[in-house]
Image: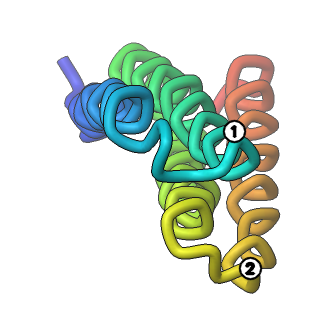
Amino acid sequence: MNTSPFVALGALLAFLAVTFGAFGAHSLKGQLSEHYLTVYQTATDYQMWHAMGLILIGLLQQQKPSKHLRRAGWLMLTGILIFSGSLYALSLSDVKILGAITPIGGVCFLIAWLLVAYSTIKSE
């Protein structure tokens, strides 16, 4: 069987999403404004959904290795780090300029999902 780092990375990021979500729900309530709690929750939601996407990419990559899936996996990982990471940092620090890089992570997500779709219809 072909191996892919994306299943393990996705599982680790899903674990961290649950951890960060619990931390936010139990430790940050009362510490952050309602606005920043929502920003923090958005970070955990997107991290979890895209961690599941990363696992999917890894499973697909194991079935049928593809340069498009490999690129999708790295873009998905980059998207999680930039999108969710910038929202975590923004919500905890109130440094508003951090929100300016969040869309870069969103674009990484979009391209990754397009590459996943493309890889399923293109034969390599």
Q: Looking at the picture, does residue 114 appear above or below residue 103?
A: above
Q: For the point 27% across and 31% down, which residue is it? A: 19
Evaluate whether residue 71 shows in this view.
no
Instruction: State the residue position of label 1.
Output: 38
- Of the residues under marks 1 and 2, which one precedes in the sequence? 1
- Image coordinates of residue 105 in percent, x first then y, are 69, 60
Q: Nearer the viewer, residue 102 or 90?
A: 90
Q: For the point 39% across and 14% down, which residue is it? A: 63
Mark 2 crowdedness (10 Å alpha carbons): few <14, some 14-19, many ≥20: few
- Image coordinates of residue 65 in percent, x first then y, are 43, 31
> Which quarter of the figure is the C terminus placed in?
top right
- Image coordinates of residue 46 in percent, x first then y, are 62, 35
Q: For the point 59% across and 60% down, which residue is it? A: 91
Q: Identify which amino acid the numbered label 1 is placed on.
A: Thr
* Total labels drawn: 2
- Image coordinates of residue 8 in percent, x first then y, are 22, 32
Q: Tell me which corner region of the image, top left, top right, bottom left or bottom right, holds residue 68.
A: top right
